[in-house]
Image: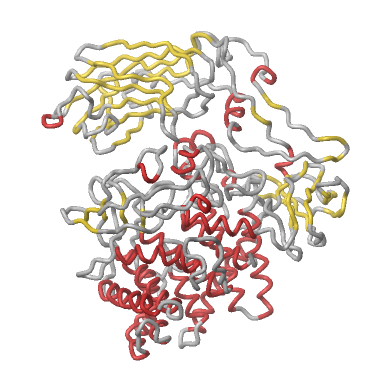
Amino acid sequence: MKKTHIKIVMSALLVSVLALEGCGTGYKGFKVGKDAELKPATLADNAPKIDDEDNPLAPGKKIIDINFDDGGTAGFGTFKEGGELYLANKDGMLDVKVSNVGYLDYSNQAFWDGFNLVEGCEYTYSFDIKSEIERKVEYRLQINGGDYHKYQGEYIKVGTEVTNFSVDFVMKDKSDASPRLVFNMGFMDDMDKANKPGEHHIYIDNICLKVKDATNAKAAAVEALPSYLNVAVNQAGYRLNDEKTVFVKTGNNKEDFFVCDATTGKIVWQGKLSETADDPASGSKVARGDFSGVNKPGEYYIYTAAGASYTFRIGDDVYSKLYKDVVLMLYRHRCGVATDKELAGEDFVHDVCHAGDAVIFGTNTKKDVSGGWHDAGDYGRYVVSGAKTVADLFAAYEDYGVKSDDMGLPDSGNGTPDLLDEARFELDWMLKMQDESTGGVYHKVTGMTFPEMAVAPEKETAQMVIAPVSTAATGDFAAVMARAAIIFKDFDAAFASKAYEAAVKAWKYIADNNDTTGFTNPEGMTTGEYPDTNTLDERFWAATELYLAANAEAGGAKKSDAETYASFIRNNLSDANLKLGLGWTDMAMYAVYDLAKADCEFSSQAKASLLSEADKLIAASANDRYYQSLGMNYYWGSNMGIASNGELLYMAARVAGKEKTDTYKKAASKQLDYLLGANAMGFCFVTGFGTFSPKDVHHRPSITAEKAMPGMLVGGANNGLEDDYAKKMLKNAAPSMCYVDNNASYSTNEVTVYWNSPLIYILAAEGS
């Protein structure tokens, strides 16, 4: 029996050129001897001379050549949007069993990745297909992200006899290194909704994509990656008295480096790099250089034998605009209201959205849950992620006195700091998410499925559905509402009282609920799940904040109420199952930190726990050339982890003795440096800032506007490779290099409000 016959032909040169396309390599010239130059690279300029046998664009060259002779399914995957299909092999053909056609043409989709399409090239695409019933099937060669538009595709009639389908087409779009081959087998316009087809099988074989004519084929001219990506700095800049470090990929020890004035080109500082050392996470040798002695305001770049850095600024106001845009990201994600053009920006202003009543899942009951923030690249609203975001805003306000009331928000000038106004917008929505009869809190409100990618918020008109109550959401809700009672008592006593009452009601729902099952999406709902099987940390956080609110007599609480919650804290503060973290999953560090700051019976133990975690981060970062603690595990949302590590280290600095305060602060500042460009990729991970930053994010408003909304922290390196584009482009990349600036890569290039919020905290700590 033959092995499955699959051929993918892709030149390494073409992959590299395509991989660079859209990566946003900005360039600001510098003078060292002579002008550095970026020359556009094209296939014609750079392609080696190769025989037709090895030429990926030779006439007749098969780019895809798939049959199913070995009994397998050749790596095909499935996507279901309300339908049901299963893949198997029958008699050397792909056997697609359609059990339910659903209600959309793409309710059932079989797909295949792993090829490329080159602009201007003419191809022939062909396959064999038959069906047990007469019906339509849609074939597509499409973009794998964004608006998912087709490069070539049509609906074809399929019957019980094998049909050989063949079509010639020219790739008219820009070259795509990771398109998707698709067969849609859902509900078609030749079907009756009241009498849909029953279970049936569709058979596909001999799928072939080959070059017909490459005379006009071309890859887009792109800037070659400049050598100065070897030299990484904080592209947003440094304050005058910051500890300033440059990171250089080099195999040479103790090279000279030069800090140059970007205006004059003159050298203003000369120093020695450290000895080079292996950085396993990036797979490189890296040296460091200290230039803390450069403390005069101005614009600079750093020059080394390995290349030069991007231009950066030194000055005490370097984070002012950054901070404002990172906060305004939350405003731009407000739901249920029309945003202001001046604040949101002409490209990101939107009308009232998602304002209609939502239906509670499994019932006919409708409820007003308008408001809150759009969580991420989709338009869902989630209690657990919103609670983390609010907690970070509260901590920034409390720890660093962020009292500005003039950021230009609609609420500005009302006597309440804008940071609290923004938190209040989310809290008002969260109050609507509480079930009045039980006190439990609904997990989220979304559509049943994600909306299409290129859609503005007010254009998503699907029925919003309220997911069931969860212990995690209820615990998080109780915690932030109890904290709100403390914080808002001097600004709005009535709201503080309302928040405290809601927190107590929520606590009664979860007090005796261990809930190790956690939330899972109900049947048919495919939006973000935010599952969590350990809810001890959420309940501990709730008990802690209610305890502290009672001691503060906030929102109508009485000190005598404190003992109710103190007993829960005593029983669980030392529990090994208490997950100490600052993420939406593991939340207990918020509780531990607030206890460490308080004058109470738990302060000493809580402080010790906090400092122990901070010391672990310090120890781990000592083994990383970029001062990070993730080791070889760069997970989904690693940039949130790095920002939250910075937050934890700043928290530790606030409760530590003087002898360790500076250690924690310097380590925390290095997390910010990383996020803003001092990393293995030399990438500033906040949109709109630095020279080399994300341009093509997985974010519907940005895709609709065809530009990135400013001030968003993207997910960052993720060596889990959890989307198809990342799997294709990053399969050989080292862990901290597993990032790609493409909207198809949702596992590396999406955004969320709760990734921005720890960045808000550390920017507040930096004195923004």
Q: Looking at this view, is 86 or 126 the one in front?
A: 126
| Horizontal arrangement in the rendering, residue 632 relative to residue 288 (left or right) | left
| Horizontal arrangement in the rendering, residue 479 relative to residue 590 (left or right) | left
Residue 189 vertical placement versus 684 (above, below): above
Query: Measuring 27% from the left and 52% from the top, which residue is drawn there?
Result: 356
| Horizontal arrangement in the rendering, residue 432 relative to residue 33 (left or right) | left
Query: Measuring 43% from the left and 70% from the top, which residue is drawn there?
Result: 588
Asked where in the image residue 424 lies, by quadrant, the reply is bottom left
Query: Measuring 28% from the left and 25% from the top, which residue is drawn there?
Result: 89
Residue 400 vertical placement versus 2 (above, below): below
Colour mapping: secondary structure
Position of residue 679 measured from the top left corner of the image (x, y, whole percent): 65, 50
Count the marks. 0
Query: Measuring 55% from the left and 43% from the top, which residue is drawn there?
Result: 739
Position of residue 326 measured from the top left corner of the image (x, y, whole percent): 55, 56
Q: Looking at this view, is 722 or 51 the one in front?
A: 722
Position of residue 408 measured from the top left corner of the image (x, y, whole percent): 54, 60
Q: Looking at this view, is 4 or 554 the one in front?
A: 554
Residue 135 vertical placement versus 213 (above, below): below
Q: Residue furthest bottom?
A: 560
Quadrant where the C terminus lies? bottom right
Position of residue 325 measured from the top left corner of the image (x, y, whole percent): 56, 55
Is any part of residue 623 visible from this angle?
A: no
Residue 592 vertical placement versus 53 (above, below): below
Is any part of residue 608 visible from this angle?
A: yes
Quadrant where the N terminus lies? top left
